[in-house]
């Protein structure tokens, strides 16, 4: 058992999560987390974060399973206090979802039930490792090639391949269903592709260095969705998804160079209709099957991604002018928009035109409307109307600056009700309401995003907010979003009534983190959580708010207020 003594405003680093933790001290305050010899739990980490002071650039390093079990609010409160929560660099690990049998071929292999190699035992080549349901086995190899043949069961792979660098995986039985927890070394070296994993359904992999992806997912016949990010250079990609007969959506983003030429056999043998999202240097490096669409998702400071609407299922999208007042005169009808199905070929968009999307497909919108989108609260507003289920990406500014890096100043009411009353929207976390928008004066934000995404009944994550929230700018922006359970509000500053009614009447909302560095006064939060009395909740404010006399309707009586 171990005791960590951590003064307030000091670093919290737990580099060996295999050790047990019984108590942690903050400037003399002792918190008893659990019974002796019990491991660190998500609840105890929440206590660590809650009691810690504000710091800068510090790290809490934890076991992967603990990090994955943390509430989003714990991670965001840590972020607001200056901590980052990182996963420990765990050895290569097999976690059995059901009883799993693995045949090991090769020399110098060790296995252990913990991350400590000194407690591991040698594995005889040709022998079987049996992992009971819910249990884990860690593997090491000092030299020589190793083959793991998965004979039966259902398993998840995680941890760093650096601990077993010359590994070949054989899984003709379809045992491996999840590889999202694998950490690849900077130099991939002799590690072969993950081809032939017939039980794998989804993959999300980041390569921190250079890599040749030729054949990596070949014949993964159950793979439906794949996301690959290469931060180094891509040197090959032929047969990347060859024979992935269930694939409908794939994404490949390359930060470095792509030296491989255009390939015609990246996706041979696919009978499905699908979408390949490509970004960075890999754009235009593929010739796809005729029933597949390549979509450019490159997003840079000089070329921001336009507003994109990505279908989770068969969906429809239209942009139209919706009037509210009896004296609606159509003054804002004189706006110009373009649309694209691949973010490469653009066409003039005729308002009210319905665009149908298959699952996995997207449509992008941009416009040359530097004077604003909607100019008056009662003169009607432009609105995206959608059916089905969709996610949102890109920059809101693209409707004003035509998808360029030109910074524009939104007029009052500019984006009012843009996505209002839209049950199709699920995830808006990659929609940016900040980049290339300027707010030079206190009055410039008045109602700019009023009811921006209100009454979106299936919304589960909020967009990226403006870094400066001007007066009444987010008034009712996300009110009546009845599926929203957690909200993270982050900005450098916020003026009076900047967040008025922002999260009002959200019936399932139970946790909110308000990471506003410089709120102007108590009225910044006027009626923030107005009538959110259906469930009890917790709201986290920065410590500066402790000096404010918050309006009574900012936080309901059944909510708990905490400060950081």
Image (tube, rainbow, N blue to C red):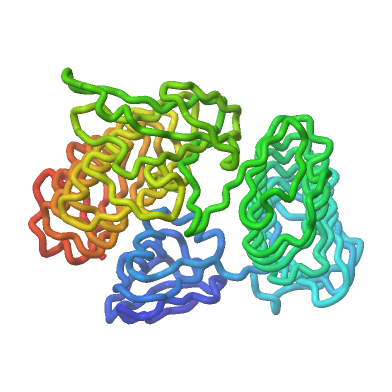
Give the left or right position of residue 339, taking residue 511 as reference: right
| Closer to the camera in the image, 22 or 346 | 346
Q: Is residue 398 left or right of residue 197?
A: left
Q: Is residue 62 visible?
A: yes
Q: Residue at x 50, y 48 (%)?
A: 305
**As displayed, is residue 413 above or below residue 72?**
above
Q: Is residue 244 above or below residue 468?
A: above
In percent of the image, x 45 and y 56: which residue is there?
A: 70
**Can residue 225 be seen from the camera position used here?**
no
Q: Quadrant of residue 478?
A: top left
Q: Residue at the spot x=41%, y=28% of the render?
A: 319
Vertically, is 321 above or below 60?
Answer: above
Farthest residue, direction top: 326
Residue 307 position in % (x across, y down):
46, 41
Please state, as top left, top right, bottom left or bottom right, where the C terminus lies in the image. Answer: bottom left
Q: Position of residue 336 (x, y in %)?
A: 40, 33
Lateral position of residue 321 relative to residue 122, left or right? left
Identity of the residue furthest to the right in this view: 126
For the image, the number of numbered tags is: 0
What residue do we see at 71% from left, 52% from top? 132
- Front-most of residues 490 and 346: 346
Residue 236 percent location from the top left of the image: 79, 58
Q: Nearer the viewer, residue 116 or 289?
A: 289
Q: Position of residue 197 (x, y in %)?
A: 79, 47
200 or 445: nearer the eye?
445
């Amino acid at each position: 058992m171990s005791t960590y003594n951590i003064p307030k405003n000091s670093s919290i680093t737990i580099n060996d999560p295999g050790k047990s933790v019984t108590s942690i001290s903050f400037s003399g305050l002792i918190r008893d987390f659990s019974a002796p010899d019990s491991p660190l739990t998500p609840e105890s980490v929440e206590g660590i974060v809650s009691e810690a002071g504000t710091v800068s650039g510090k790290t809490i390093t934890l076991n992967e399973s603990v990090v994955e079990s943390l509430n989003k609010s714990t991670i965001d409160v840590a972020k607001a206090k200056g901590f980052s929560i990182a996963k420990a660099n765990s050895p290569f690990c097999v976690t059995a979802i059901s009883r799993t049998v693995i045949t090991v071929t090769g020399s110098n292999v060790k296995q252990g039930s913990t991350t400590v190699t000194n407690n591991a035992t040698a594995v005889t080549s040709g022998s079987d490792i049996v992992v009971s349901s819910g249990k884990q086995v860690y593997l090491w190899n000092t030299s020589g090639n190793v083959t793991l043949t998965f004979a039966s069961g259902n398993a998840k792979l995680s941890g760093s391949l650096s601990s077993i660098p010359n590994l070949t995986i054989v899984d003709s039985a379809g045992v491996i269903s999840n590889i999202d927890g694998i950490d690849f070394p900077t130099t991939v070296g002799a590690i072969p592709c993950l081809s032939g994993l017939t039980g794998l359904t989804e993959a999300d992999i980041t390569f921190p260095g250079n890599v040749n992806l030729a054949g990596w997912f070949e014949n993964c016949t159950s793979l439906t969705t794949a996301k690959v990010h290469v931060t180094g250079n891509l040197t090959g990609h032929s047969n990347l998804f060859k024979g992935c007969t269930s694939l409908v959506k794939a994404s490949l983003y390359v930060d470095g160079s792509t030296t491989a030429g255009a390939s015609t056999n990246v996706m041979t043998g696919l009978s499905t209709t699908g979408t390949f999202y490509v970004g960075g240097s890999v754009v235009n490096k593929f010739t796809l099957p005729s029933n597949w669409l390549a979509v450019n998702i490159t997003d840079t400071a000089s070329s921001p991604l336009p507003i994109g609407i990505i279908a989770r299922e068969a969906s429809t999208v239209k942009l139209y002018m919706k009037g509210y007042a009896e004296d609606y005169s159509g003054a804002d009808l004189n706006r110009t928009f373009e649309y694209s199905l691949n973010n490469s070929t653009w066409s003039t968009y005729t308002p009210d035109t319905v665009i149908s999307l298959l699952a996995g497909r997207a449509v992008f919108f941009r416009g040359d409307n530097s004077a604003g989108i909607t100019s008056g609260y009662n003169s009607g507003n432009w609105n995206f109307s959608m059916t089905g289920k969709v996610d949102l990406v890109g920059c809101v500014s693209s409707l004003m600056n035509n998808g360029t890096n030109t910074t524009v100043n939104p007029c009052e009411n500019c984006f009012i009700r843009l996505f209002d009353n839209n049950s199709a929207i699920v995830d808006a976390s990659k929609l940016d309401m900040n980049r290339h928008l300027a707010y030079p004066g206190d009055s410039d934000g008045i109602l700019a995003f009023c009811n921006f995404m209100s009454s979106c009944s299936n919304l589960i994550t909020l967009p990226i907010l403006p870094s400066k929230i001007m007066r009444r700018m987010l008034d009712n922006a996300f009110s009546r979003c009845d599926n929203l359970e957690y909200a993270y509000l982050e900005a450098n500053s916020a003026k009076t009534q900047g967040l008025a009614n922002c999260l009002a009447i959200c019936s399932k909302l139970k946790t909110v983190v308000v990471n506003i560095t410089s709120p102007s006064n108590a009225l910044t939060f006027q009626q923030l959580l107005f009538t959110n009395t259906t469930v009890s909740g917790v709201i986290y404010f920065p410590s500066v708010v402790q000096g404010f006399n918050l309006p009574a309707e900012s936080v309901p009586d059944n909510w708990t207020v905490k400060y950081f």
